[in-house]
Amino acid sequence: MTNKLVLITGGAGFIGSHTADLLKEKGYRVRIMDNLARQVHGGKWPRYVQEKGFELQRGDVTKKKDWEEALQGVSYVFHLAAYQDQRPDFGEFFRVNTVGTALLYETAVAEKIKLKRVVLASSQFAYGDGAYRCKHQKEVFYPELRSEADLKKKRFDITCPHGGVAHFASFREDQQLTPINSYGLSKESLERLGMRLGKTYGVPTVALRYSIVQGARQSPRNLYSGALRIFTLQALRNEPITVYEDGNQLRDFVNVKDVAQANLLALTKKDSVFGIFNVGGGKGYCVSDFAQIVKNITGSSSRIVIGGYRRTDSRHAVSDIGKMKRLGWIPSATPEDSVREYVAWLRNEVAYRSLFLR
Ligand SMILES: NC(=O)c1ccc[n+]([C@@H]2O[C@H](COP(=O)([O-])OP(=O)(O)OC[C@H]3O[C@@H](n4cnc5c(N)ncnc54)[C@H](O)[C@@H]3O)[C@@H](O)[C@H]2O)c1
């Protein structure tokens, strides 16, 4: 019998738990290693991974002995555990995301564990502000982080080096990476490390750069979980929905069930090995339009208020998903579907009611 034991690090989380459900449905056995991070789970296994026949190991990807236990008998790994926050503890991103990944390969090599596939969770944040075009030059250019002075003056759009209009180009896997925060940098180094060690030691590795993933089970405790969480909580409390900059910044959104399908393809397709793929929604939405979607679906009386900024936000972030589609992936859910799923789930979670019931 083939060994179909899959380890999912961070499997108690949002993407990991949906991936675990899909793998179970496809006949895989699932082991989850998760440290039940306080800012995501408050130290407890969430209900949705319990009593499903998953092996649950409380463990930490920064500890080699936890990897040694987790990797025993495993053929496939989804490495999804990550530190994702907005705090300026720069070292923590590398300690968890990059060193944690190195320990995966270090343990597999030391213990002579023959892994058939490792799928690494990377992020659209690896692109930073990405590439722009202008009429003055043929080649794209990669802008520097916008200055505080420009943002204060509400000059949000990126201009070309000649002072003219610059046009954002959707992120492509083969472009230069110019991450603008420690999280993005840690994901870039995680990818490079995984690909290098994977090729050297014969560990077939794939990296997926997820865009903004949405749907049920995204912990509202998780400060990193972004616009959907913030807009939804504001809308359910009928407080103003606060949109940064001028609201015209573009983002692409992908549903977590579509992401689980992309994960499965990365695990099973031969053509994916040593590939890097964008996994996104394929279409850019203005953030203010997205706020309106949340307002409509929640039936909120909130006003949408535009203003403020965060220094390390990208102006636009939209991924080209052609490469993943050529692997056979077809995302099917819309952002409206994802918002509906998230809001319905949140309303049913007794533990989170105090966040929006007044
Ligand atoms: N959700 C998104 O929009 C998005 C976008 C891009 C990339 N990603 C990446 O996808 C992966 C999964 O993200 P998610 O949205 O499911 O996040 P999540 O926070 O819901 O899940 C992450 C899980 O990792 C666990 N974890 C954290 N630190 C750990 C450690 N040191 N050891 C073991 N477990 C640890 C947490 O307890 C949590 O269960 C992450 O690598 C993230 O960077 C997510």
Image: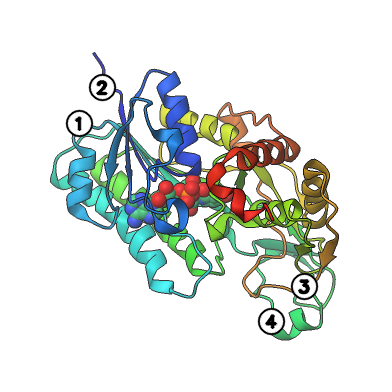
109 vs 74, nearest the viewer: 74
Extreme residue in the bottom direction? 149
Name the residue rendered at 46%, 33% in the picture. 19
Between discs 2 and 1, the one toward the N terminus: 2
Q: Do tag 2 and tag 1 residues touch (Cβ < 8 Å)?
A: yes
Q: Which mark is residue 73?
A: 1
Name the residue rendered at 25%, 32% in the picture. 74
Query: How far apart are the two marked residues, 4 and 3, measured between alpha carbons?
Result: 14 Å
Q: Which residue is under mark 3? A: 160
Query: How far apart are the two marked residues, 4 and 1, measured between alpha carbons?
Result: 51 Å
Name the residue rendered at 81%, 77% in the picture. 155
51 vs 121: above or below: above
Between discs 4 and 1, the one toward the N terminus: 1
Query: How far apart are the two marked residues, 2 and 4, measured between alpha carbons?
Result: 53 Å
Q: Mark 3: few, some, or many residues within 10 Å (few <14, many ≥20)?
A: many
Q: Do tag 4 and tag 1 residues touch (Cβ < 8 Å)?
A: no
302 vs 20, nearest the viewer: 302
Amino acid bearing label 1: Gly
Q: Which of the two discs, 1 and 3, sits closer to the camera?
A: 1
Q: Which mark is residue 3?
A: 2
Q: Quadrant of the N terminus?
A: top left
Q: Secondary structure at mark 1?
A: loop
Amino acid bearing label 3: Cys
Q: Mark 1: few, some, or many residues within 10 Å (few <14, many ≥20)?
A: some
125 vs 307: above or below: above
Query: How far apart are the two marked residues, 2 and 3, measured between alpha carbons?
Result: 54 Å
| Residue 233 image point, x, y percent | 68, 54
Query: How far apart are the two marked residues, 1 and 3, measured between alpha carbons?
Result: 53 Å
Name the residue rendered at 77%, 47% in the picture. 294
Q: Which residue is under mark 4? A: 147
